[in-house]
Image (cartoon, rainbow, N blue to C red):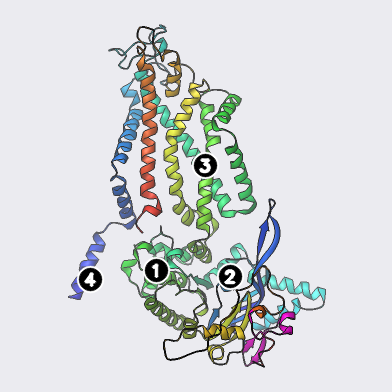
């Protein structure tokens, strides 16, 4: 009888999926339990689809697809019509086209900036936390310097110094964004460094590189990934703010911030109809807000799932 | 005394205390302060003392997880060679001393760094106190046990897999545990996994850093018996660090008693328990509870606290708490001297007591 029990158990073992996959499925199930997560996921997937299929949704007309086509030079925006489903900005720039291609641009800015931030932040944070001493001192004092200057002021000054334009905005956001990640990773590593499993790995002859990649990062990376997913929205928001201030892309570019900037003069309509041009501000503003909201919801959900304190153990 | 696996000579480990804006060096915490210790091949040496006396630091320094501040550690070196180097180092002649330093660099493991440590890592292993802390929560049991084999590049993937399974059976677990995470196991099982990892590279010397303290009593006995069995099967040498005297009595051949970074008494288990010389050891032994309500044992209650290791008392380290302390105890620090065959004690007055 005992034998049958064993064989049945062995069968089960064979059918069972790999534990790593099991762990992943478990996380996903928890991830999808929260309705807010699903809302966030839907928003981001929708934006992603728009970004991917932008050439089909709004076929580009010039050589540079990010340049919004405009029909005529009339200053006052036109309301939604058959030709312009969401209306136009001043000088008849098509809002629908701008929103679609702006999505692509937002993903590009967000992903590029946050990825570069993560890379720099994790490397410097790992160096500071793992080696400590003078390395730590230097890196952390540099991050302190970054924190001492108001973010937007520093960003504006740097953009002007590099030379206006979208490229400059991206470079500046990369330069200014990494200290958050460095601090968090360093803090995590300081906690982990004293753990016995790190000592055990060293006693087993593991190199520093192996310890960092095999033991420290897998146990500390989730906290920065959560921050990163939330920051994709924030980065896009900051880029929009810089564009609004006239430091980012030029007029007529499919950039949400630029679109809001172009609506500046049309927030309030003529005396007889104050809300005549509602669409010029509301539509790009709403799109930006949804994008940021989507990433924030995803980041929140990621924290609930990956935070080791909230996991079963 | 010809086959010592580990020889520790005048080992010191100080932790600097820094203060002020510029991190000036103010003082040192003298965690281990001049320890001489020889561990014989195949024995189990118990290292006891209260918390904060430096026993774990001593162990980790031998393992080279800490860098020693001063002193020498020899691993598996012939006795003559050790004596030769020690003789040269303590010589009056400057040239002989520098010759000694040169020779020492070759065999003193406190001077080994980076790659030179690798062969040592294979022969010396450790089991930690708390297995929930010593196993990486994101690695599978398979990866945890295989880790030293992978980093040492001792065998190929298939051999490693075979070895890991073999190790699991050695520590009383099974193949089906291979693909699980540490959190799926009980405390005792986790400690078995940690032991399997330590055994992986065929070590000769194992540091047991309170391996049973975090476990509940019924499991403690199982783990202790397992450790004894492994020691016999694989001719291991243990340095068994603990504050639990009965555990040490059960498993050790010899016992070293540590107090405030120094060894106070060293002898065979019987000598320590039956023929105690040092007043501190007596106080420790009298604190062992006896499971019999009828026996009335006179307990020696020590007054005061352990002095600050930043600034240990002058003379004998134990003198402020010792009721037998005299002027000489406050003036001169006692050396570890041989009281009887292989029973050492560091006390000025042990003969009278």
In the rendered structure, the answer to whether residue B97 lies left or right of residue A139 reads right
At horizontal 58% and vertical 42% (from top left) the residue drawn is A143
Q: Is residue B54 above or below residue A40?
A: below
Taking the image as drawn, is residue A119 in sight? yes
Classify mark 1: helix, strand or loop. Answer: helix
B190 or B305: nearer the eye? B305
Discs 4 and 2 share one subunit: no
Q: Which residue is mark 1?
A: B190
Q: Are marks 2 and 1 in contact (CB under 8 Å)?
A: no
Q: CA distance from mark 2 to mark 1?
A: 24 Å
Taking the image as drawn, is residue B107 in sight? no
Q: Which of the image's four quarters has the N terminus of chain A?
A: bottom left
| Residue A107, quarter of the rendered image | top left
Region in magenta: B321-346
Across and down, in percent, residue A200 comes to 50, 65
Q: Which residue is mark 2?
A: B57
Classify mark 2: helix, strand or loop. Answer: helix
């Amino acid at each position: 009888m005992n034998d049958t029990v064993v064989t049945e158990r062995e069968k089960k073992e064979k059918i069972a999926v790999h534990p790593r996959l099991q762990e992943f499925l478990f996380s996903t199930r928890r991830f999808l339990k929260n309705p807010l997560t699903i809302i966030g996921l839907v928003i981001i997937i929708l934006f992603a689809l728009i970004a991917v299929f932008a050439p089909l949704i709004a076929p580009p007309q010039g050589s540079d697809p990010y340049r919004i086509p405009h029909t005529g030079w009339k200053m006052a925006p036109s309301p939604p019509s058959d030709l312009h489903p969401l209306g136009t900005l001043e000088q008849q720039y098509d809002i629908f086209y701008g929103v679609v291609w702006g999505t692509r641009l937002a993903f590009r800015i967000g992903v590029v900036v946050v990825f570069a931030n993560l890379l720099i932040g994790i490397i410097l944070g790992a160096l500071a936390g793992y080696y400590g001493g003078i390395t730590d001192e230097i890196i952390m004092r540099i991050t302190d310097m970054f924190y001492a200057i108001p973010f937007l002021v520093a960003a504006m000054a740097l953009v002007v110094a590099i030379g206006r334009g979208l490229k400059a905005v991206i470079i500046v956001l990369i330069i200014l964004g990494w200290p958050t990640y460095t601090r968090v990773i360093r803090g995590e590593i300081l906690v982990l460094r004293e753990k016995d499993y790190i000592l055990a790995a060293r006693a087993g002859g593991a190199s520093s590189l192996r310890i960092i990649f095999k033991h420290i990062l897998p146990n500390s990376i989730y906290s920065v990934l959560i921050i990163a997913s939330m920051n994709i929205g924030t980065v896009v928001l900051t880029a929009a703010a810089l564009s609004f201030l006239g430091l980012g892309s030029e007029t007529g570019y499919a950039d949400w911030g630029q679109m809001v900037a172009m609506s500046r003069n049309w927030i309030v309509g003529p005396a007889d109809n104050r809300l005549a041009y509602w669409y010029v501000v509301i539509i790009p503003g709403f799109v930006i807000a949804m994008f940021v909201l989507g990433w924030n919801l995803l980041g929140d959900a990621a924290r609930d799932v990956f935070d080791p304190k909230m996991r079963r153990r | 005394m010809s086959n010592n696996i580990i020889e520790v000579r005048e080992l010191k480990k100080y932790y600097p205390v820094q203060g002020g804006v510029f991190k000036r060096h103010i003082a040192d915490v003298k965690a281990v302060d001049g320890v001489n210790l020889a561990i014989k091949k195949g024995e189990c040496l118990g290292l006891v003392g209260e918390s904060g006396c430096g026993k774990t630091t001593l162990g980790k320094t031998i393992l080279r997880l800490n860098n020693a501040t001063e002193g020498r550690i020899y691993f598996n070196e012939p006795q003559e060679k050790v004596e030769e180097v020690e003789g040269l180092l303590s010589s009056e002649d400057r040239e002989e001393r520098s010759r000694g330093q040169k020779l020492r660099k070759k065999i003193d493991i406190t001077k080994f760094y980076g790659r030179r440590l690798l062969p040592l890592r294979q022969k010396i292993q450790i089991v930690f106190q708390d297995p929930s802390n010593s196993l990486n929560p994101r690695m599978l049991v398979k990866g945890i046990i295989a880790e030293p084999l992978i980093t040492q590049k001792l065998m190929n993937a298939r051999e490693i897999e075979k070895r890991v399974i073999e190790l699991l059976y050695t520590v009383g677990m099974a193949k089906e545990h291979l693909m699980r995470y540490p959190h799926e196991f009980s405390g005792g099982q986790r400690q078995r996994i940690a032991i399997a990892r330590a055994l992986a590279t065929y070590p000769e010397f194992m540091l047991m850093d309170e391996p049973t303290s975090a476990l509940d009593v019924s499991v403690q006995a199982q783990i202790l018996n397992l450790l004894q069995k492994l020691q016999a099967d694989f001719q291991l040498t243990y340095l068994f660090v603990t504050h639990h005297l009965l555990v040490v009595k059960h498993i050790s051949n010899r016992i070293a008693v540590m107090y405030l970074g120094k060894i106070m008494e060293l002898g065979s288990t019987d000598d320590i328990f039956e023929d105690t010389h040092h007043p501190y050891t007596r106080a420790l032994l009298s604190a062992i509870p006896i499971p019999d309500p009828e026996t009335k044992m006179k307990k020696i209650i020590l007054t005061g606290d352990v002095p600050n290791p930043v600034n240990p008392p002058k003379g004998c380290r134990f003198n402020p708490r010792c009721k037998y302390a005299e002027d000489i105890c406050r003036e001169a620090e006692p050396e570890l001297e041989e009281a009887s065959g292989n029973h050492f004690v560091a006390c000025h007055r042990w003969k009278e007591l």
